[in-house]
Amino acid sequence: SLPLGDPFPLCVHRSPSLHGRALASMLGEFCASATAACCANLVTHPLETIKIRQVLYSGSVPPGTIAMGMLMVNREGASSLYKGLGAALLRGAICGGGRLAGYAALKDVGASRGWLTPELPARAPQKPAGEEEAANCARPEPPSAAAQLALRASLATAAGALAQLAAAPLDLVRTRQAADRGANVSGWRTAASVLDRHGFLALWAGSSALLVRIALLNVSQLLTYDKARVEAAQRLELPGDSVLVHACASGAAGLAATTAICPAENVKTVIQSAPALTVRLACRRIYSVGKLRGFFRGWVPLFAKLGPHTLLVFLILEQLRLHMGIEATI
């Protein structure tokens, strides 16, 4: 029986030190995720710029990735490949860090409540006594595999949507800078131009397509990575924190994410280049130029960018987690 002065079981009490460690872990996860996203953006930004130019190409058949890149360099100089880099890095820190760290934090909440179970524990660090005591408390039976998959998808969507809304103006500035064929214009001047012409809310132009895109990206990329990591570890007979396992899982995640988000990515790009367009009008414009294939225009440069980007993000993130002492999420 419980002491008369204590109306709650021991297992529901969380000491301040546990809350402090959870907050520090969340902050560390965000910093690691933001750093990984920025490092990946530095490498893959030219491919993102080329993809934007291909999507906005006025002809029916745009030049290939290499041809478009050479055309940009010949006409505008090599620096044209890095137009919008400042906005891209800031966006990567906010959106990339937010969506990855948010998903990790939400999964931790789900695990603490018994809603999610580990698929493949990468590491098993020694837990402090307080955490062990809480972990040993009775928990309800975990939901079915299908229910857990649906929950993971919901958590990925929620984390991605919040991060994307915060970074939407930077996404717009980056797109408009990359689409500009003239001299390099600063991000501040680009944002001021949008404000003067279209108003404050125009900074969130294309947000509906952005939210669809980020939901598809987070669900396809993160869930594929979680599952592929399990499969790779089992088939290769390697531990879950092996670099080769992370590389295989990242490759599968990049392929799935590229295919899932390409149509929404193209609609978003068209709207951000012309904020007066609605999603319906943007879809109509894409279809009138390239039919259904138009929605997948730029798939190759998108994969050339997102594939290595996904690989770099997860490889860097996992190494930062290891060196920062952050326990890998389930």
Image (spheres, grey):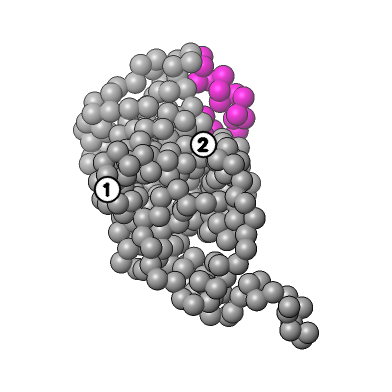
Image: 237 above or below 131: above
* Quarter of the N terminus within the rendering: bottom right
Residue at image location 45% in from the left, 61% down from the top: 30
Residue 231: name its quadrant: top left
Image: 29 above or below 115: below
Residue at image location 47% in from the left, 41% down from the top: 223
Which sits in the foreground, 31 or 17? 17
Mostly what secondary structure, the magenta segment?
Answer: helix
Which sits in the foreground, 303 or 150? 150
Residue 293: name its quadrant: top left
**Which numbered disc flags the more N-terminal residue, 1 or 2?**
2
Left or right: 304 with respect to 327? left
- Amino acid under label 1? Leu
The residue beneath circle 1 is 238
Q: Residue furthest bottom?
A: 5
Residue 305 visible? The answer is no
The residue beneath circle 2 is 216
**x, y (%) of residue 240?**
33, 51
**x, y (%) of residue 125?**
38, 67
**Magenta region: which residues?**
265-289
Left or right: 61 with respect to 206? left
Residue 214 visible? The answer is yes
Is residue 187 in the magenta section? no
Residue at image location 51% in from the left, 14% down from the top: 288
- Amino acid under label 2? Leu
